[in-house]
């Protein structure tokens, strides 16, 4: 919470397929909603499908294939439709991967940035 406040995050967007955490219960959607209140928002339109996620996790899909498939999914879903610069100002995308390097939150951020070229992506 201190980090979010320090960088003035307005809203945390949970973009996970499943909003539960078996390892750290604090990161369940319910606990985050309680802690963050109205700052917590669930945005499943940015979540990967179960098939893409499971395929990558069990090694049937490589990271380059995952990237391609997830980008195609975003193109088909149009999750940025209806967003405005105000709605994406100071949002934080939440996922479970430690690094954004091989995580769909980086791809989602890049997708949003492609729609709004004046925004800056910062990895916390």
Image: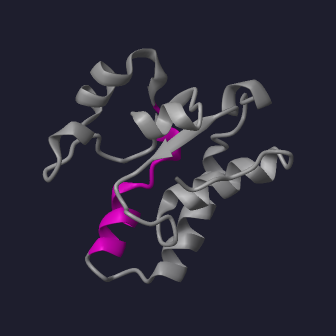
- In the image shown, does 116 or 23 lie closer to the viewer? 23
> Is residue 49 rendered magenta in the image?
yes
Q: Is residue 12 left or right of residue 26?
A: right
Q: Who's the residue at 26% across and 41% down the image?
A: 27
Residue 47 in picture, x, y percent from top left? 45, 48
Which quadrant is home to the N terminus?
Answer: top left
Check the image and report above or below for 64 versus 14. below
Name the image quarter holding residue 7.
Answer: top right
- In the image shown, does 96 or 44 lie closer to the viewer? 96
- In the image shown, does 35 or 17 lie closer to the viewer? 35
> Is residue 62 rendered magenta in the image?
no
Q: Is residue 11 left or right of residue 2?
A: right
Q: Who's the residue at 14% across and 53% down the image?
A: 23
Residue 38 in picture, x, y percent from top left? 45, 16
Check the image and report above or below for 112 versus 35. below
Q: Who's the residue at 54% across and 40% down the image?
A: 92
Magenta region, residue range: 42-57
Residue 96 in picture, x, y percent from top left? 34, 55
Q: Is residue 23 left or right of residue 13?
A: left
Can residue 43 be seen here? The reply is: no
**Of helix, strand and loop, which mostly describes the magenta segment?**
helix
Residue found at the very far top of the displayed protein: 38
Residue 114 in picture, x, y percent from top left? 79, 53
Q: Is residue 65 left or right of residue 60?
A: right
Can residue 46 be seen here? The reply is: yes
Q: Who's the residue at 47% across and 79% down the image?
A: 63
């Amino acid at each position: 919470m201190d980090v979010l406040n320090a960088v003035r995050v307005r809203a945390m967007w949970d973009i996970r397929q499943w909003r539960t955490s078996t390892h750290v219960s604090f990161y369940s959607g319910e606990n985050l909603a309680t802690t963050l209140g109205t700052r917590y928002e669930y945005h499943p339109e940015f979540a990967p499908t179960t098939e893409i996620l499971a395929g990558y996790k069990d090694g049937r899909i490589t990271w380059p294939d995952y990237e391609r498939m997830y980008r195609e999914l975003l193109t088909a879903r149009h999750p940025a439709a209806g967003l405005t610069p105000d709605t994406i100002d100071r949002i934080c995308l939440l996922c479970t991967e430690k690094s954004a390097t091989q995580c769909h939150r980086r791809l989602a951020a890049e997708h949003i940035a492609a729609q709004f070229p004046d925004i800056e992506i910062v990895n916390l």
